[in-house]
Image (cartoon, rainbow, N blue to C red):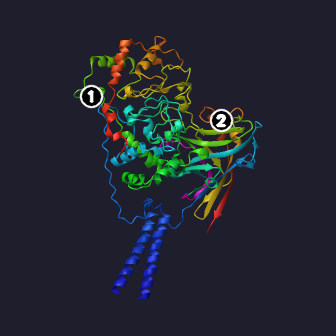
Amino acid sequence: MRRLFLSLSLLTAALMAGFLACNTNDPQAVRPPAKFGLDFSNVVGTQPLQLGTVAYKNASGELFTPTNFNYFVSNIRLIRTDGSAYVVPQDSSYFLIRQTDPATQKITLNNVPEGSYKAVSFVLGVDSLRSTADISKRTGALDPAVDHTGANGMYWSWNSGYIFMKLEGTSPSAPRDATGTGNFRYHIGYFGGRDTKTINNLKTITVSFGADVAQVDPFRQPTVQIQADVLTIFDGTTPISIKAYPEVMISPFSATVAKNYATMFSYKGLKTAVTD
Amino acid sequence: MKQLQLIGFLLSAALFGVVASCQSGGSEVVTPAPGPGKLDTKPPVVYQTTPYPWKKPANFPDPVYNFANNPLTLEGVALGRTLFYDDMLSVNGTVSCAFCHQQPAAFAHPDHALSHGVNDKIGTRNNLGLQNLAFYKNFFWDGGVADLDLLPIAPIENPVEMAHSMPNLLNAVRQSAKYRPLFQSAFGSDSITTARFLKSLSQFMLTMVSANSRYDTYARKEAGGQLTSDELAGLNLFQQKCSSCHAGELFTDQSFRNNGLSRALNQDVGRYQITLRPEDKFKFKVPSLRNVARTPPYMHDGRFWTLNDVLNHYTTMQEVPELDPVLRQNGKPGVLLTDPEKQQIIAFLNTLTDTAYIADRQFSAPN
């Protein structure tokens, strides 16, 4: 009986210690961590993007059917209403959005500080630091050995650079291949170079939520809807015709494509999931 | 008594709850991921690696490679050596790294002007010998890859070289009974990741140091380090006529230059493909001349088969607009050398052959 009493006391003490340790180490422990969602929806003008089935038309009057559309989103910052920013931890801030995989189009940021947010900014591409980082720092979407061949290839092994944006498709305005299909391919990379300065096609995008404010706390998870319009790749700052540029990869003209896609994102709305 | 047991049980449950909530509310608790072989009932083998004693040759500059991110171990080097000699790195199991990088040729490909890949596919450039890779800022004739750890992906995935895909190759390595124990002994678990695969290849390649040619024993004033009078005359001429590009103990300043090759049959833009800078058009890496007598043919497209041909090019080259200024003297392209002087330079270049390196068993195919 005495022994039982002793063990009970010890258990109670341990229980107390557990609470205390929790409280001293992490005062937020009683509140679950807050989350923030970013949903990317890819469109062509006013229509949703569909791969391989729909022929869209650009401002040059050319019909085109996208067959593949991928881009990297990285270095995400959430900007508060007071102008300060929450910077997503670097190692958790690289995402590859692929049109063929809807799951990749929904980003969930975990452990976001509670507060009021008015905008998000991100880099379209993979910044120079990570583009030159040790292989052990290139995991997940950045792993040069995972799914980087074929249609989803987003890594150039011959210059060890990431492809920031890849748009491929067919168009009657592109030169015909042996099967009679006209193909166009835009693979845009180049982070500015290591020892030798090169083109820098990294673009920092800021998407403002307009008059909306995203309130983050453990019971309200906002999800911001961001739209990417493929049409701006052709019809952005500088109009680009598929006939004149059926293939843009490793040429100085890639900078013109990058300038165009820098304008492709817009804010479409905010949804907040409320829990008790 | 039973009641007390119940209280005890409830208390334990509550205690567990506290600990659990503590974890989810606080920072992530990282538990070491067990390897795929976790069902083993055998007691865990103690994981112990032996550091590889990598040493910079006394007459060499400091290495470029960041060894801190990939400490060399005998086990890691052994794994990399096994991979280097393994045909499974190519899509149809016919071409290993060593297929094109052969030790007797100082890890160049003798008798091949252009690189030779799977299904007899032919590349666009002459492969470079492998040696002293720890000292290079970048790799390939165009310097496209600047990190040795990322280098093997290029030949593995090049459709005219090994034509494999990294995901498929890594899956094959994971399924190979041979490799799991090798990764286990090199890295402490048999988890086969991209980083471990590439870093073990780097570990082996980093051990490939060639610094024991007759020239080296001369340069380091070691016993037996004498050169003949022709070789010394050649060294003297080399220093006057060649060493502004083939500089220092690596015999390259690692720059990219145009050396006046005719483009009548080859329009390869070289470094431009990497930098897209107009001034880099038709420029190629100045190659090291270590073991040069062992690595014919020469130039980025293997157009010259002998050192004599190479020196004749330098004395007879025609004007090209992109010619490096150092190769244009008094407005005329080329280097002034008499035939006897060329022979002296070749005599000197022969002293750069490191016979110990090309015979060293630690770089040969593992048994």
Between B21 and B131, the residue placed more toward the observer is B131
Q: Position of residue B135 (x, y in %)?
A: 38, 34
Residue B8 in the image: state x and y as whole percent: 42, 81
Q: What chain is tagged by disc 1?
A: B
- Relative to A140, say whether A159 is above or below: above
Residue B340 vs B107, above or below: the answer is above
**Can you name the residue that lies furthest to the bottom here?**
B1
Q: Which residues are magenta?
A: A110-134
Q: Which residue is mark 1?
A: B217
Q: Residues within 10 Å of mark 2 (few under 14, many from 20)?
A: some
Tell me the SS state at disc 1.
Answer: helix
Instruction: From the viewer's perspective, tell me whether residue A217 is left or right of residue B34.
Output: right
> Which quadrant is home to the C terminus of chain B?
top left
Q: Are marks 2 and 1 on the same chain?
A: no
Residue type, mark 1 in image = Thr
Which chain hosts label 2?
Answer: A
Residue at (51, 68) in percent of width and height: A30
In the current view of this chain or complex, which residue is farthest to the left? B223
Q: Nearer the viewer, residue A230 or A6?
A: A230
Query: Residue B12 location, x and y as percent?
Result: 43, 77
Residue under numbered circle 2: A247
Q: What SS does tag 2 mark? A: strand
| Residue sitting nearer the eye, B35 or B110 | B110
**Residue A131 magenta-highlighted:** yes
Q: Tell me where residue A248 sits by quadrant.
A: top right
Which quadrant of the rendered structure holds the N terminus of chain B? bottom left
In the rendered view, does A111 fall on the left or right side of A261? left
Residue A128 showing in the rendered view:
yes
Specify the label residue A68 is tagged with. Answer: none
- The amino acid pointed to by label 2 is Glu
Determine whether, in the image, residue A230 is placed left or right of residue B202.
right
